[in-house]
Amino acid sequence: MIEEFIARHYHVAFIVVLAIGLYMLIESGNLVKKVIGLNIFQMSVFLFFTTAAYVEGGGPALVGPESVPGEHSNPLPHVLILTAIVVGVSLTSLALALVVRVYREYGTLDEDRLEEVMAGEP
């Protein structure tokens, strides 16, 4: 059992990073910490997809005289993750811009305090 655990250490890393990001999203009342938690959560998904595409002993998927016989790694998940990283950066920049706007409008980043201010309570 320990050998399987050691052999799949990247799955353990995925679960740990996912749990940290999810905990930050749920537990923190600060909006900036929620954005950071979202980024950590997103990074764990990137880790999962890139490690799932790994093939032990696999070579690059080349066609032509440089091609190596045997198993090949699938490049599609890595390409999709590159696209997801670009989308994640734009999502983060939009979220931080909204956080700045909320702070300028209401003077706080605390979720509970924002609910009070928006409800009209002093």
Image (spheres, helix red, strand yellow):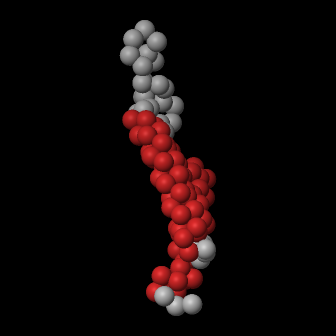
The residue lying furthest to the top in this view is: 65
The residue lying furthest to the bottom in this view is: 121
The N terminus is located in which quarter? bottom right
Identify whether 116 is placed above or below 32.
below
- Residue that appears at 48% across and 88% down: 120
Q: Residue 1 versus residue 15: which sits nearer the camera?
A: 15
- Is 21 left, or right, of 65 in this rendering? right
Image location of residue 66, percent across then percent down: 46, 12
The C terminus is located in which quarter? bottom right
Q: Residue 58 versus residue 52: which sits nearer the camera?
A: 52
Image location of residue 60, percent across then percent down: 47, 25
Residue 1 visible within the image: no
- Residue that appears at 39% across and 11% down: 64
- Residue that appears at 53% across and 79% down: 114
Q: Residue 92 versus residue 3: which sits nearer the camera?
A: 92
Identify whether 94 is placed above or below 99.
above
Q: Residue 75 versus residue 106: which sits nearer the camera?
A: 106
Image location of residue 45, percent across then percent down: 48, 53
How many numbered circles does the render carry?
0
Residue 95 visible within the image: yes
- Residue that appears at 56% across and 75% down: 106
Identify whether 100 is placed above or below 105.
above
Image location of residue 79, percent across then percent down: 43, 35
- Is 114 left, or right, of 65 in this rendering? right
Within the image, what quadrant is residue 39 found in? bottom right
